[in-house]
Image (spheres, grey):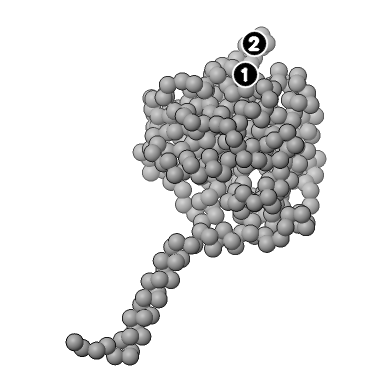
């Protein structure tokens, strides 16, 4: 048997090292990138960015933009700030705001604009890193962000003292909107009479946290209720388990704690809770509106997916559409997806509930 030379040994050893390194990067790249977003400072000693002044237009992504003289919509955006040195991002972070305007507003705020004037505050949002860990520091950063949203809502409510209102939030924004609804109705129970609905999009939240002040919508024409869901593709049990394992809820002290009961699920296709699986023919339309200017209505593709609330999650069939893909950086792929499976369904739901709200008042 021919013996290997020293040079050949070195070559094989180097090749093996490259293979091992490549495999390690593939396995641990997520952990490496996640660690790079860790602020590496306790939240208790962290100095956050300056607070927004909501009297200034520069502290709002949108101010009363959309359909005139109908409903007033308060929209809370999801995480767009990656993190790094900050637990909570400054409101003028260029990269975060570019993602907000390119992806979030056209896909998730725009469905409300046909029926209402949409306002969306910029706030010191908790970083993407806080969504990737259950550390106490991360929970405190998420609770800190709520104080900005609460302040923005208080001013917005003073500027919109009458008429129907809609509260909407997506992912982290939905989490904050849930607490906002509970606190607002606790402080002023009469506000429920003005509430068309609260839309907690891609948000896990329990019925119990609202203490019967507001309940999930049981019918498409019910008002003063909550439309909440978190979607998972049929068969993706690992994703479902991850969502439920990481789900947090607000306790009576305004702290984020583990969710101990099944989250509420209202099917956005039917606008109700306990119903049979909605067939694809009932689906009003998905879209990828990324990059569209505000006010431009995207093309919708309906009859695309079937949906069903089960175990507190919204299960849906796999959409057969090339435009519903998520790309971008490692961090961007962990933010809200750059398309909306339920754009048309949200539009329709808001229209039906607002019409019902007006009809009950003879308007």
Do the CB atoms of the residues marked 1 and 2 lie less than 8 Å apart? yes
At 44% from the left edge and 66% from the top edge, which residue is drawn?
A: 24
Quadrant of the image for the C terminus?
top right
Residue on which the image places disc 1: 223
Residue 54 lies left or right of residue 331; in this view the side is right
At 58% from the left edge and 40% from the top edge, which residue is drawn?
A: 247
Q: Residues within 10 Å of mark 2 (few under 14, many from 20)?
A: few
Q: Nearer the viewer, mark 1 or mark 2?
A: 1
Residue on which the image places disc 2: 360
Judging from the image, what secondary structure is the residue with disc 1 in?
A: loop
Residue 252 lies left or right of residue 315; in this view the side is right
Q: What percent of the width, then of the height, locates residue 333? A: 50, 51
At 62% from the left edge and 40% from the top edge, which residue is drawn?
A: 258
Q: What percent of the width, then of the height, locates residue 19? A: 38, 71
Distance between mark 1 and mark 2 Cα atoms: 10 Å
Q: Is residue 189 visible?
A: yes
Q: Is residue 319 visible?
A: no
Judging from the image, what secondary structure is the residue with disc 2 in?
A: helix
């Amino acid at each position: 048997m021919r013996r290997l030379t020293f040079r050949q040994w070195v070559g094989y050893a180097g090749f093996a090292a490259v293979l091992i390194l490549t495999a390690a990067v593939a396995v641990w790249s997520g952990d490496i990138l996640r660690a790079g977003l860790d602020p590496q400072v306790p939240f208790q000693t962290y100095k956050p960015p300056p607070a927004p002044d909501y009297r200034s237009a520069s502290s709002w992504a949108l101010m009363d933009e959309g359909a005139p003289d109908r409903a007033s919509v308060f929209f809370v955006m999801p995480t767009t700030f990656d993190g790094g040195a900050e637990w909570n991002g400054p409101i003028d972070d260029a990269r975060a705001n570019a993602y907000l305007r390119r992806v979030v507003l056209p896909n998730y705020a725009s469905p409300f604009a046909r029926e209402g004037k949409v306002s969306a505050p910029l706030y010191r949002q908790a970083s993407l890193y806080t969504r990737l860990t259950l550390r106490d520091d991360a929970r405190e950063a998420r609770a800190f962000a709520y104080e900005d949203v609460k302040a923005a809502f208080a001013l917005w409510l003073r500027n919109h003292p009458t008429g129907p209102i809609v509260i909407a939030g997506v992912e982290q924004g939905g989490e904050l909107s849930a607490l906002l609804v509970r606190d607002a109705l606790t402080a002023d129970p009469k506000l429920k009479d003005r509430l068309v609905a609260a839309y907690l999009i891609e948000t896990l939240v329990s019925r119990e946290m609202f203490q019967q002040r507001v309940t999930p919508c049981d019918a498409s024409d019910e008002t003063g209720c909550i439309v909440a869901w978190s979607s998972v593709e049929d068969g993706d049990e690992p994703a479902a388990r991850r969502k439920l394992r990481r789900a947090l809820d607000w306790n009576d002290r305004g702290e984020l704690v583990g969710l101990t009961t099944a989250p509420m699920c209202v099917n956005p296709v039917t606008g109700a809770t306990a119903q049979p699986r909605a067939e694809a023919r009932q689906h009003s339309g998905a879209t990828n509106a990324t990059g569209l200017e505000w006010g431009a209505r995207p093309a919708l593709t309906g009859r695309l997916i079937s949906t069903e609330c089960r175990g507190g999650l919204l299960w849906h069939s796999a959409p057969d559409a090339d435009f519903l893909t998520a790309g971008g950086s490692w961090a961007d792929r962990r933010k809200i997806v750059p398309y909306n499976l339920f754009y048309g369904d949200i539009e329709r739901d808001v229209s039906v509930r607002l019409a019902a709200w007006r009809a009950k008042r003879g308007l």
